[in-house]
Amino acid sequence: MASPVPVKEKKLMDMKLGELPGWILMRDFTPRGIAGAFQRGYYPYYNKYVNVKKGNVAGISMVLAAYVLFNYCRCYKELKHERLRKYH
């Protein structure tokens, strides 16, 4: 059964596994498209976690945790090599 919403306009969480490759190929991977994607994700995040009446450190700590995880994944190869080295 075909969906009434075109594949290009669906959100990632609404995609079925079989439609995923076609959806990825329809994305805009130009610098302007990537910037637009970050902007579309930034504003809902900011309004939900940072720009609230009774704010706390949850929004900032999630960004910090994502930054730490990203850098760990980026440097994992060097860290693994360093861990396996014998010091003697």
Image: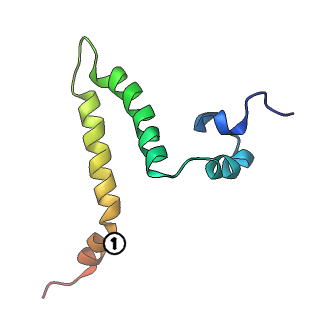
Give the image quarter of residue 65: top left
User: Total number of numbered labels?
Assistant: 1
In this rendering, would 25 be left or right of 54? right
Could you say which is closer to the camera, residue 83 or residue 49? Answer: 49
Could you say which is closer to the camera, residue 41 or residue 29? Answer: 29
Residue flagged by tag 1: what amino acid is it?
Answer: Lys
Q: Position of residue 57 (x, y in %)?
A: 21, 27
What residue is shown at x 45% (from left), y 32% (from top)? Answer: 40
Please identify the quadrant where the N terminus is shown: top right
Q: Position of residue 36 (x, y in %)?
A: 45, 39
Residue topped by disc 1: 77
For the residue carrying disc 1, how many other residues have a C-alpha within 10 Å: few (<14), some (14-19), or many (20+)?
few
Furthest-top residue in this view: 53
Furthest-left residue in this view: 88
What residue is shown at x 30% (from left), y 36% (from top)? Answer: 62
In this rendering, would 26 be left or right of 86? right
Could you say which is closer to the camera, residue 51 or residue 82? Answer: 51
Image position of 25 with respect to 16: above or below:
below
